[in-house]
Amino acid sequence: MTDYIRLEAPNSPHPDPRQGGTAGLAAEALRGQVLGVISSVLEDTDPECAGARSQLRHFLVHNAGSPEKALLEHLLHLHGSELCGSELDGDQEEPEEPQD
């Protein structure tokens, strides 16, 4: 797994957790959660999820040093078809009023 995740990234837009402070602690906590999710996905052996694991590896390679961005892109890609419809275009149907 560490082949895909590099924890050090040059010009990283994220606060450096080693510098301390609230932002650093929050970034460290978030990164820990992200790495846990990524590890869980990559360690899964369900054959039906092989495509998702492959896709996550792809995003990790293309976002080396930024596992948060890789996971975000992976999730957006997985659920993209659900988000690309009328919900984003503003064509969302209004819920019907209950009839008496």
Image (cartoon, rainbow, N blue to C red):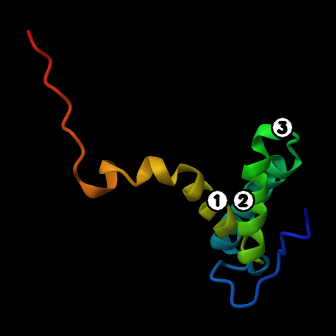
Between the C-alphas of marks 2 and 3, the distance is 15 Å
Q: Residue at x 32, y 49 (%)?
A: 87
Query: Which class describes the residues within 10 Å of circle 2: few (<14), some (14-19), or many (20+)?
Result: some
Q: Is residue 99 above or below residue 65?
A: above
In the image as oriented, which residue stretches furthest toward the bottom? 11
In the image as oriented, which residue stretches furthest toward the top? 100
Q: Nearer the viewer, residue 16 or 45?
A: 45
Between the C-alphas of marks 2 and 1, the distance is 7 Å
The quadrant holding residue 77 is bottom right
Q: Quadrant of the C terminus?
A: top left
Q: Residue at x 79, y 58 (%)?
A: 35
Q: Position of residue 98 (x, y in %)?
A: 15, 18
Query: Which class describes the residues within 10 Å of circle 3: few (<14), some (14-19), or many (20+)?
Result: few
Marks 2,3: beta carbons within 8 A: no
Between discs 2 and 1, the one toward the N terminus? 2
Residue on which disc 2 sits: 55
Q: Is residue 84 above or below residue 60?
A: above
Q: Residue at x 76, y 43 (%)?
A: 49
Residue type pointed to by label 3:
Asp
Between the C-alphas of marks 3 and 1, the distance is 18 Å
> In what element is the residue under mark 2?
helix
Q: Quadrant of the N terminus?
A: bottom right
Q: Nearer the viewer, residue 44 or 65?
A: 44
Marks 3,1: beta carbons within 8 A: no
Q: Nearer the viewer, residue 67 or 31?
A: 67
Residue on which disc 1 sits: 74
Marks 2,1: beta carbons within 8 A: yes
Q: Nearer the viewer, residue 99 or 68?
A: 99
Residue type pointed to by label 2:
Gln
Q: Does residue 89 appear left or right of residue 98 in this picture?
A: right
